[in-house]
Image: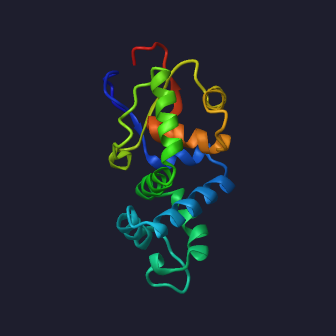
Amino acid sequence: MPDDPKQAQFLPFHAINEFMRPDFRSEVVRSALQAVEASSENRGRLDQLTRKHVSVPGFRNSAKAPLGLRVKPTAEAFEKSPQLVAAILSAWAAARPELAGRVHQLLTERDWKVLPLEAERARLPGFLTHWPKGEDFEILVQAYQAAFPEATETSDEISLMVVWISDRLPYDLDENDDQ
């Protein structure tokens, strides 16, 4: 870790697994793979990473395996490959533009420093480690549900989108608001 306190510190993308339940991880992977099959937007990169990191028995090219056979090995690779995590989360978030926009709005209104919504977060080296003091997933989910009472997203989906849009994991709580 850098000695300069002003230098950003990152956790690799696959560090998110410490914050995800296995069933939700599988749900996110399935959803992202379905979204990529329905649109070619993130397909090339995800297919490349699937061929490299995912092994589906009976298939030389795991990207060509049926979706149902790819979910479990992809979820297992998700635990180890930061590049695959970034591609999966990018596809998952792209399939939920309304949730992404709402979370971005919520975080901006709460004075979080976030990248523009259209930024390619998958190109970052990982997640920032500093989390604003006084904020946690429960508080953010409650704020989201209060701001958007008609929303149907689960607390897990809201929390994951907070992590993706903010590019932060609650690893270190900021001691002051200047960071």
57 or 136, nearer to the observer: 136
Quadrant of the drawing holding the N terminus: top left
Q: Position of residue 16 (x, y in %)?
A: 53, 45
Q: Position of residue 171 (x, y in %)?
A: 53, 31
At a point 54% along the width and 78% down the height, the residue shown is 56
Q: Position of residue 131 (x, y in %)?
A: 50, 26
Q: Position of residue 101 (x, y in %)?
A: 47, 39
175 or 159, nearer to the observer: 159
Considering only vertical position in the picture, is 132 above or below 176?
below
Badge count: 0
At a point 46% along the width and 38% down the height, the residue shown is 165
Considering only vertical position in the picture, is 72 above or below 146?
below
Give the quarter of the image for residue 44.
Answer: bottom left
Quadrant of the drawing holding the C terminus: top left
Considering only vertical position in the picture, is 74 above or below 17?
below
**Left or right: where 22 falls relative to 87:** right
At a point 41% along the width and 73% down the height, the residue shown is 51
**Left or right: where 167 falls relative to 157:** left
**Left or right: where 28 falls relative to 22:** left
At a point 33% along the width and 25% down the height, the residue shown is 3
